[in-house]
Image (tube, rainbow, N blue to C red):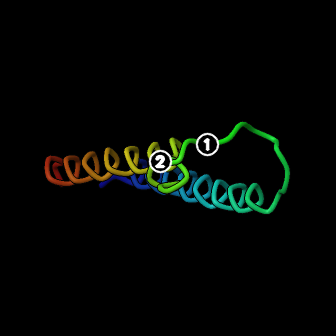
Amino acid sequence: MSMYTLIILLIGIGIIVYSLVYTLFIGKERKAVKGDIDAELPDNVQKHAYIRNPIFLTYAICFGILLVMITYFALTWTW
């Protein structure tokens, strides 16, 4: 793996980790706020708050695609 690819990979992983941590902190702050800021959520979404959250789904899909790309490039790259 070239140095350029490694640097881009580390920067990308850093951004993903920072965004995930930031999203988790914002989610916890939102739970701490009391009052009717938004409309009520459907029961299915309330029961599965993390699974049905589009932010977490986006991270999971992005991470899966990233793993597939890393594996593909690691196996096909000429060392």
Residue 36: image quadrant is top right
Indicate left or right for 40 with 79 as reference: right
Q: Position of residue 39 (x, y in %)?
A: 71, 36
* Residue plotted at (34% across, 52% down): 2
Mark 1, residue position: 41
Secondary element type, mark 2? helix
Mark 2, residue position: 44
Q: How many numbered callouts?
A: 2
* Residue plotted at (72% across, 55% down): 26
- Of residues 12 and 42, the one nearer the viewer is 42
Check the picture and name the quadrant holding the C terminus: bottom left
Amino acid residing under circle 2 = Asn
Indicate left or right for 77 with 36 as reference: left
Indicate left or right for 53 with 72 as reference: right
Local crowd at mark 1 within 10 Å, few (<14), some, or many (≥20)? Answer: few
* Residue plotted at (53% across, 47% down): 43
Marks 2/1: CA distance?
8 Å
- Of residues 62 and 43, the one nearer the viewer is 43
In the rendered structure, find residue 6 and report the number of the disc placed on it: none
Identify the residue at the far top of this view: 39
Q: Position of residue 57 (x, y in %)?
A: 44, 46
- Of residues 48 and 72, the one nearer the viewer is 48
Check the picture and name the quadrant holding the N terminus: bottom left
Amino acid residing under circle 1 = Leu
Local crowd at mark 2 within 10 Å, few (<14), some, or many (≥20)? Answer: few
Indicate left or right for 71 with 64 as reference: left
Q: Position of residue 25 (x, y in %)?
A: 70, 61
Callout 2 touching callout 1 (CB < 8 Å):
no
